[in-house]
Amino acid sequence: MNLYPKTFRYPLITLEKTNSTNQYISQLCNQQPEEVAELTTVTAEFQMAGKGQRGNSWEAEEGKNLLFSFVLYPTFLEARRQFILSQIVSLAIKEELSRWSDDITIKWPNDIYWKNKKISGILIENDLVGPRIARSIAGIGININQDTFRSDAPNPISLKQITGKEHDRHEILTHILKRVEMYYKGLQLEDFETYSAEINTRYARSLFRRRGFHSYQDADGLFLARLLRVEQDGRFVLEDESGKEREYLFKEVQYIL
């Protein structure tokens, strides 16, 4: 059975199984660069080698969840502003999942959480040409209808576990891509600095543990801190108990859950 109708509004490739939807669409773009339009999307019912951030694997029961990748060609974006692509993708997913729960947040830089549990992961791979972004591929896994998780991942959860009911994966995918397209067109058509500042504000309001002091760990050990802000280049800025500001790039600090 094909999950997606022929009237799907974006170019779509549906696979039963693949090693990685990111890998598949990347190879397709390399082989047929002029034929792969923006927002071309590859979905799979099962991934043999799906990857997340930090090289982690992504557990997903076959036919239960959303596993997909799509491509953009943001040549108008300078490489130094590439974090905004991560922001718009994570916002699109967060806002879609928030239709079912008020407890959906974005865990910096772009994991999607329900309370203290992970419902979605995002891996964005950007190809740069000089100072610009030539191609961006976003790979996304969202736990939709899985009932149980058997891997050693510490805190997975699905939308079905949150709501107690099955969800239409096609509908969710369609809405996410529409939201991505809306944000992406805004970056192209609106005043960039004004619009990117608005995105940064929305992202800040959506962040996991955005209030209060929480436990973190960096190369020097454990500490308590509160979130001050996320810079437009993606730097994570905390203030510890002594009032000292601490800035981190991705992988330089981790949440203690």
Image (spheres, rainbow, N blue to C red):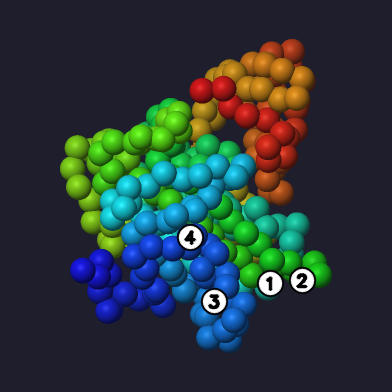
From the top left corner, tell me how far across and down residue 77 is, in percent: 69, 66
- The residue indicated by pointer 4 is 19
C-beta proximity under 8 Å, tags 1 and 2: yes
- The residue indicated by pointer 2 is 129
Residue 182 visible in rendering:
no
Q: Nearer the viewer, mark 4 or mark 3?
A: 4
Q: Nearer the viewer, mark 4 or mark 1?
A: 4
User: Which of the marked residues, 4 or 3, is nearer the chain's N terminus?
Assistant: 4
Residue at position x 40%, y 41% in the image = 119
- The residue indicated by pointer 1 is 134
Badge 1 marks a residue whose secondary structure is strand
Q: Nearer the viewer, mark 2 or mark 4?
A: 4
From the top left corner, tell me how far across and down residue 56 is, in percent: 55, 42
User: Which of the marked residues, 2 or 4, is nearer the chain's N terminus?
Assistant: 4
Amino acid at dot 3: Leu
Q: Is residue 13 above or below residue 169?
A: below
User: Which of the marked residues, 3 or 2, is nearer the chain's N terminus?
Assistant: 3
Q: How far apart are labels 1 and 2 at the CA level?
A: 6 Å
Q: Is residue 51 above or below residue 125?
A: above
Residue at position x 51%, y 80% in the image = 37
Residue at position x 36%, y 34% in the image = 150
From the top left corner, tell me how far across and down residue 6 is, in percent: 27, 79
Badge 3 marks a residue whose secondary structure is helix
Amino acid at dot 4: Asn
| Label 2 neighbour load within 10 Å: few <14, some 14-19, many 20+ | few
